[in-house]
Amino acid sequence: MIWFDIEGSWAGTPASHIAFIHGLINQATDMGVRWGIYTSRSQWGPITDNTSEFGAPALWYAHYDNSPSFSDFVPFGGWAHPSIKQFMGTSTVCGVGIDKNFY
Amino acid sequence: MTLGNSYSFAIVRVYEEIGQVDPNGAQTIKNAWAGGMAHVDGYIFPCLRCGNPAQQVSHDEQTISNENLLLSL
């Protein structure tokens, strides 16, 4: 499946961002590609005004607390439960730069 | 990175926020499977200022198809 990375400083209004995200999702759906959303509460809030209009698709959230556990998860947007957590940023494993995830 | 390090799932960037398919994505996906991953997904970092989100997804999927890449369902 494909994850859409929704983070960063997005110019424009939350409404325009939501329309853009719909564009990504609609194309993936039309092509029969399973998709999920990578984001975090601190990103989703400003970008979409914490919308819940996408319901609760698979959520890969980021919280760099170095804890491979969902116990820190606080609901946001339309989400009550996450699928994957990115718990640590840039780390090096076998000489490769990665972020660490738990599911 | 192989299964020897207890990682079994990789999610590889396939599209960059500057507005292009990630040139390293295809090889990284192939390497992940070759290294013994049980699951390999991709992620798209969309280009907001580029507009046309449908085209970004379409270009990405075209590359996945052209390169015969396998992603977990």
Image (cartoon, rainbow, N blue to C red):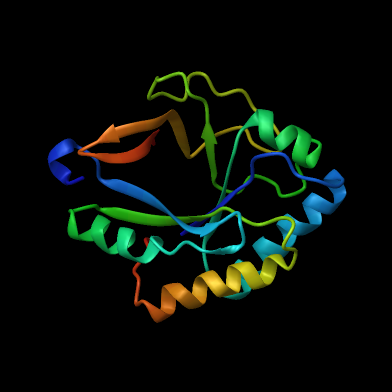
Determine the residue positioned at 19% across, 60% down. Answer: B34
Residue A32 at least partly seen: no
Q: Residue at x 61, y 23 (%)?
A: A74
Judge by depth and name the residue closer to the eye, B73 or A24.
Answer: A24
- How far across and how far down the image is residue A45, in percent? 75, 33
A73 vs B65, nearest the viewer: B65
Residue B38 vertical placement versus A49 (above, below): below
Count the labels in the image: 0
Q: In which quarter of the image is the C terminus of chain A?
A: top left
Residue ranking furthest to the bottom? B66
The quadrant in which residue B46 appears is: bottom right
In the visual, does B15 lie left or right of A8?
left
Residue A90 appears left or right of A44: left
Could you tell me if residue B22 is visible in this image?
A: yes
- Outermost residue, left direction? B4
Q: Is residue A63 above or below residue B39?
A: above
- Toward the viewer: A15 or A34? A15
Going 57% across and 53% down the picture, which residue do you hit? B45
Q: Which residue sits at x=26%, y=55%? A: B32
Q: Position of residue A96 (x, y in %)?
A: 28, 42
Between residues A52 and B9, which one lies in front from this camera angle? Answer: B9
x and y, in percent, of residue A78 in the image: 70, 39
Which picture quadrant has residue A52? top right
Q: Residue B42, how many percent across, how many down?
A: 44, 57
Name the side, left or right, on which A76 lies relative to B12.
right
- Residue B24 in the image: above or below residue A65: below
